[in-house]
Image (cartoon, helix red, strand yellow):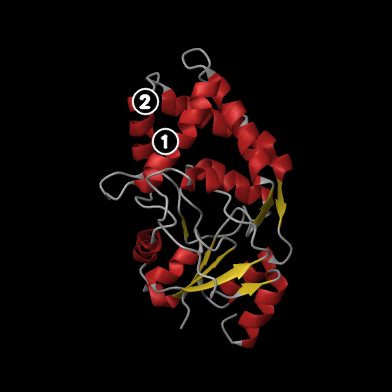
Amino acid sequence: MVKALLCDLDGTLLDIDFNGFMREYLTDVSRRFADCIPPERFQRQVLASMSAAVAKTDTDRTMLQAFMEDFSRALPLPPDALDRFHDYYKTDFPRLRSWGRPVPGARELIEAALARGLDVVIATAPFYPELPIRERLRWAGLDDVPFRFISSSEVMRRSKPFPEFFQEIADHIGVKPEECLMIGDETVMDGAAARAGMRVALVGPDRGSFSSSILASPALRGVAAPDDSLPRYADMWELLARLRAEGIL
């Protein structure tokens, strides 16, 4: 029995030009630190420290703590670094909305899951704090949805593409992995849920990973091989029809 619906965000619930979004994001946020770190060095280090946080195997630190510690070892950050990030996400980050738009059928699928009494979770890679995740949910037209849990960097201690990420979410919401259905678009990042014992449904064309620049880190090479056996649906409407036919939604 499916008790929880886990949904990826970028490329699944949010149609986004991720490469364009990341370029503008890195350029924008680096300006907040231009008084102490050259923008190009800052941008490179953001990606490097994201990779380091993803690759870590301990559960002692949150993803945000691991990111900040790795960044600080490489480049000195000002004492108010977290405040600068927070202010950026609150004031300037919403301007990036032009890169993202709602995915047709996504809201209908989520509303169907809520109507069936399922827990609905945002299971996005925990690269960002909750504030910018909720902003991107606004771009997806889903900011009013009562999500059971959001996998933000302040909370999560592991990341995709490790199965421990999905087990951690299951533990947070109090269900077994086999009671979860993970909906995503990326074979490696989202497909890793199958290794945690979850059912997986992929939606849309296989465009590779939005996180390819992070997964290219030497510490992450070979972490997960694509699982071509996972079912893939053309769009949310096709998946919704299938889940209704099965009596899940």
Image spot of residue 150 (x, y percent): 48, 54
Work out whether 111 lies above or below 76: below
Mark 2 falls on what kind of element?
helix
Answer with the quarter of the image where residue 79 lies.
top left
Disc nearer the start of the sequence (1/2): 1
Can the viewer see residue 53? yes
Mark 1 falls on what kind of element?
helix
Q: Residue furthest top?
A: 35
User: In the depicted view, which residue is nearer to us: 236 or 129?
Assistant: 236
The residue beneath circle 2 is 74
Can the viewer see residue 154? no
Q: Residues within 10 Å of mark 1 (few under 14, many from 20)?
A: many
Q: Amino acid at mark 2?
A: Ala
Answer with the quarter of the image where residue 173 lies.
bottom left
* Callouts 1 and 2 close, C-beta under 8 Å: yes
The dot on residue 207 is none
Q: State the residue at coordinates (35%, 33%).
A: 70
Q: Amino acid at mark 1?
A: Ser
Work out whether 225 lies above or below 21: below
Spatial CA distance of label 1 from label 2 is 9 Å
Answer with the quarter of the image where residue 90 lies.
top right
Image spot of residue 161 (x, y percent): 44, 57
The residue beneath circle 1 is 49
Work out whether 69 lies above or below 221: above
Image spot of residue 36 (x, y percent): 46, 14
User: In the depicted view, which residue is nearer to us: 173 or 207?
Assistant: 207
Q: Residues within 10 Å of mark 2 (few under 14, many from 20)?
A: few
Q: State the residue at coordinates (44%, 71%).
A: 194
Q: State the residue at coordinates (64%, 67%).
A: 203
Image spot of residue 60 (x, y percent): 25, 46
